Image (cartoon, rainbow, N blue to C red):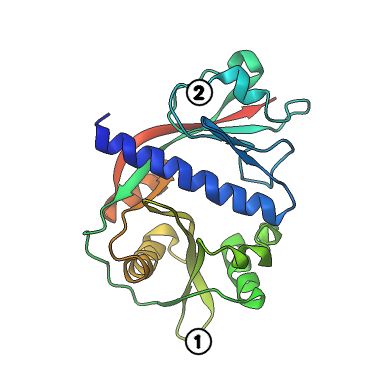
Amino acid sequence: MTASKMFLVRAAARSNAEWCAVVSRSHGVAGEFGHQAWTAPVRTPPYYPDAVTLAPDTDPAALTARIDTAAPGATVKDSFADLDLTEAGFHVLFEAQWIHRPASAPATASDLTWDVVDDSETLRAWALAWDGGDGDADLFRPELLDDPATFVLAGRSVDGGVVAGAVASRSDHVVALSNVFARDGGPDTAWPVVLDAVHRLFPAVPVVGYEHGEDLATALSHGFEAIGPLRVWLHG
């Protein structure tokens, strides 16, 4: 991996950990940043890891000692895909790729308008659209709107309803995108409006995130490049 890609992967991992910390705090879970990883001592909200590594060659024993492995379900985001947690009772849940889009990349035209969610009622509408009826809309709580680095982006149809969106997390060196969705058409519909929003909000900042499978292929078709692997490990 080149030095520039390693810098971006480190920045993406840090930004992702900061977003995980924001979501966890909104659920009353206080995590801690260390030199090698962000960790939470109790179980984090669904879909969010109990630990995110911030540097290569993290000490596995020290990492797992900082999270709750007494019961099944702990997860670790292995940001550099260089850990072996099998002896600690983990197995690989999935593998993915960090992705990067240069700040200089042109924005893509979209038929949807967008805005930044700034009230709890709109956040609820956004969460319901993201959830698609799976019962997880309560994951996104109003406390998220108090975080100055978090921008919940809502793509709207002609009647004003939320039909697409993402979360943009601004950190020191990058803006990280997560929870990219569209009610119809999936990520291929979502990326143009999301990238337009990010380009206007942060015109000089590189964009990062992570994807896998078909969603990775779609992101690459919208101007991203894959910059390095990651793994998510599940305990139990």
Tell me which residue sits at (56%, 34%) in the image.
34
Q: Kindly check if marks 2 and 1 are in contact, taking CB atoms under 8 A apart as contact.
A: no
Q: Residue furthest top?
A: 87
Q: Which mark is residue 159?
A: 1
Sequence-first tag of 2 and 1: 2
Q: CA distance from mark 2 to mark 1?
A: 49 Å
Indicate left or right for 226 with 123 as reference: left
Residue 211 visible, this orientation: no
Q: Residue at x 69, y 47 (%)?
A: 45
Badge 2 marks a residue whose secondary structure is loop
Where, quadrant-wise, is the N terminus in this rendering?
top left
Q: Amino acid at mark 2?
A: Thr
Q: Position of residue 109 (x, y in %)?
A: 28, 72
What element does badge 1 sit on? loop
Tell me if residue 17 comes above or below residue 159 in the rendering: above
Quarter of the image containing the C terminus? Answer: top right
Q: Position of residue 42 (x, y in %)?
A: 74, 38
Q: Position of residue 167 (x, y in %)?
A: 50, 60
Residue of label 2: 58
Q: Is residue 4 above or below residue 135?
A: above
One can see residue 82 in this view: yes
Return the mark for residue 75.
none
Amino acid type of the residue tagged 1 in the rendering: Asp
Q: 98 left or right of 134?
A: left
Work out whether residue 199 or residue 166 is closer to the camera in this orientation and state it: 199
Nearer to me, 130 or 39: 39
